[in-house]
Amino acid sequence: MSCHESSKLVPDYFDETLSLQQRKAMETHLQNCADCQEALAEAKSINVHLRQWQDEPVPQWQRIPKQLHVKSEPARPRFSFWGQWAPLAGAFVMAVAVMFNVQLQVQDYGFSIAFGGGSGIDQGVIAAQLEEFENEQRAAQQQTLQLLTAQLEERQAGNNARLLETVIEQFGDSTTRSLEQVMAYFEAQRQQDLQLMQTSYQRLADSDFQTIRSMQQLANYVQYQGN
Amino acid sequence: MSFTDQDEALISAALDGSARAWERLVKRYEARVYNFSLRLTGNQTDALDLMQEVFLGVYRNLHRFRGDAQFTTWLFRIAHNKAVDMSRRKYMVTSLSSVAGQDQSDEEVLDHIANDNGEHDPERLLSASQGNAEILGYLDILNWEQRLVVELKVFQSHTFDEIAEMQDISANTAKTRFYTALKLLKAHMEQSHELS
């Protein structure tokens, strides 16, 4: 195929929009051009071959888009009127209850609702409970303090004795006098440590009592606000 | 009631929200759209994806259909646009598009065909009959633009002016693509026959 007309003639042959005059010119050229005859014959053959396509069956697929499902079957609301408003109403009741300090008491003869904090809480009872709690805490801490002090004293005495034995082994009896001085120094240090330890524990205990008092003050304040 | 009138009645009912009417409308054209998609994509999975996109596009734009053109013309215009979109996304024929372009010389084209041993992924053609599998094998050597022109000319019987308008190219460019595609197909068919 060397005729440069082929590239135009072949597509034109398949184009139904050619005028009668154009088609006649094409046929005239074809009668005199073996290259174009061959090119056209091949193109026709390919066209026939491709047109042997047999339509394939369509596999199963979702024909109806989701949007149309929604349109054709209007979805019922998930909740009824009361179902929609119930959570909001519940939240509102809870908010009112918190705001007005509502107290619900269930007793043998029924139940009672009280607004504000005055009627339900006896200030004297709270004060007595806090006093009792403070005393219990104080006694427990004193006991713990004494126990810790005793343990510390015992441990320091043991350490001093072991240190003394070691020194005696190293320096012998000739240094007995010096050792007595060292021993006196250790004893003084031990007493000082004990005092320091007792002071620290006492501060710690005082801090706890102060916390309890703060709680008591807070309870009194809440009581006052309720009233 | 004529075929067109039935289309219009179904379109009107579908626009009013009738799923049944829409389903009937789809069933009238799904085989044509599916086979169009299969010839363009070369495999069932992509063909189904393309068909779904086409009908979804039709559904979304159904209210814009004025009835001044045939529904099939309007439908296949959407199908063409969706196919172009899909080709841009997926590079349907990436393996060949870079070597079988229209700017190639004949030698390059024939070199490419000589290197093509004619084997195509058999899994892609499972659904097709023997003849269809062979046709898909031939179409597979074309790049996307050539394949689309062949589809629109041979199978959809559009004029080159219509093809040019659809693809926003000149009619001469459409003709050149068609002629190049025919040359490629001829060379490939000859080679296949020699091998067999």
Image (cartoon, coloured by chain):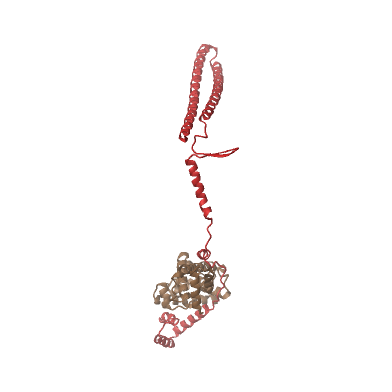
Chain colours: A red, B brown
* A67 to A206, vertically: above or below: below
User: Is any part of residue B196 visible from this angle?
Assistant: no
The location of residue B10, given as percent across then percent down, is 51, 73
* B191 to A146, vertically: above or below: below
Please identify the quarter of the rendering in which residue A12 is found. bottom left
Q: Which residue is outermost to the right?
A: A108
- Frontmost residue, A177 versus B38: B38
- Frontmost residue, B122 versus B60: B60
Q: In what quadrant of the picture does the N terminus of chain A appear?
A: bottom left
Please identify the quarter of the rendering in which residue A19 is found. bottom left
Q: Which residue is outermost to the front?
A: A109
Total of numbered circles in the picture? 0
The location of residue B82, given as percent across then percent down, is 46, 68
Left or right of A150, for residue B89: left
The location of residue B59, given as percent across then percent down, is 48, 68
The location of residue A165, given as percent across then percent down, is 56, 17
Q: Residue at x 53, y 53 (%)?
A: A82
- Frontmost residue, B99 versus A195: A195
Q: Residue at x 51, y 53 (%)?
A: A84
Q: Residue at x 48, y 43 (%)?
A: A96
User: Is any part of residue A93 visible from this angle?
Assistant: yes
